[in-house]
Amino acid sequence: MSTTQVQLARLLGLSRSTVAAALNPNSPVKLRDSTRELVEKEAAKLNYRPNRHAQLMRGAKSGIIGIFHFGGLSQVAAERAWHASQAIQNAGYSILSTDLSWSPGGVKAGCEAMLDAKVEGLLVAGLNDPASVTELKVIRKKGLPMVTLSGNELKGVPHIRGDANLAMQQMTRHLLRLGRRRLLLLMPHSEDIAPGIYLWAFPERLKGFERSLKSASGKLVKTFSASSRAGIQGRVLSCNAAFDLFDPYRVSKEMMQGVLAEKCMPDAVICGDDEWAIGAMAAAREAGLRIPQQIAFTGYDNTSQGKYIDVPLTTVAQPSKAMAGRAVAILLAMIHKENIGRIPHLTQFPCELIIRRSCGS
């Protein structure tokens, strides 16, 4: 049985209200530093834990912020959630975190758990399930402060993400400067990549790709031409193949094998993420192609494996720590009702090109 505040008060010869104030950093009651230190020291010695249920029954704030995380095994999604959790804890709050990618249909139960715990705010990281939008209405009806971090937006909810459109413009321009003239954009489609899952980033990256092609007087084509008069060509190849958490390389490898079987192949492949790039590169190596001399590859997200493969991968790094920090700062402002009218709906962060040998630079 855990030690109670009443027991601590009796042991120390203090009133229960004094003990409660000493253990609550937000208490308005003024105490001597020596008294607060005495109570905190004894509480630590006796492994005192606050009775959350009793606190909530008395109407006290929970001091908890919830995190819904849809990242699964994705490194960049885990990084964002981790940085957000650190920022939340640094602000003096506890965390209730649920990875909803492990539990299909678990959003409803997750929402109920958040409400039961009386979280003071909710951070939704990497939202990629349309069904969740409906389930999250339960939270929104309660007026609970909410912020989305990357993933898909929710109407009327502050949203923080990397600027994928600009990043793709920069990547495309970089490849064009290197003399690449047949550029393939290879990535999952935005609809039905798996049952109930879509990707917000596809249209943003497509816009960036198309814009850079247009500014270079290039054109979109259905198949590449080897003619010297063809000029700069861009092609988009996407699919809604089933997503495999445990083999994220297979689909892009199979797609790339099909591309390489065509009469004219690309001389640069821009992939939707690092894992797709690694799968596509495997197909090129098996076909006997030299990377990047004959064909260049780029990824997205700057995952660790891209640095250590035989031809290190050019990629895009998102500022995960800064994005998570901004998301938490906005959420805290909403919780404390500070400058609510000045909070933007969309905050985009510029990303960084990480240039390595896979594109020939």
Image: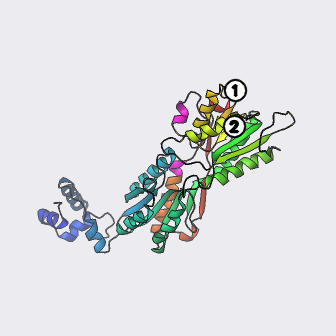
**Which mark sits nearer the N-terminus, 2 or 1?**
2
- Queried whether the magenta region covers residue 310, the answer comes back as yes
The percent position of residue 358, horizontal first and vertical second, equals 63, 31
Left or right of residue 33: residue 182: right
**Residue at figure coordinates x 49%, y 65% from the top left:** 146
Disc 2/disc 1 C-alpha distance (Å): 18 Å
The percent position of residue 127, horizontal first and vertical second, equals 52, 58
Q: Amino acid at mark 2?
A: Val
In this view, 105 is above or below 28:
above
Q: Nearer the viewer, mark 2 or mark 1?
A: 2
Asked if residue 277 shows in the view, the reply is no
Q: Residues within 10 Å of mark 2 (few under 14, many from 20)?
A: some
Q: Which residue is mark 1?
A: 293
The percent position of residue 121, horizontal first and vertical second, equals 44, 65
The percent position of residue 274, horizontal first and vertical second, equals 57, 40
Picture quadrant where residue 32 is located: bottom left
Q: Which is more toward the observer, 171 or 40?
A: 171
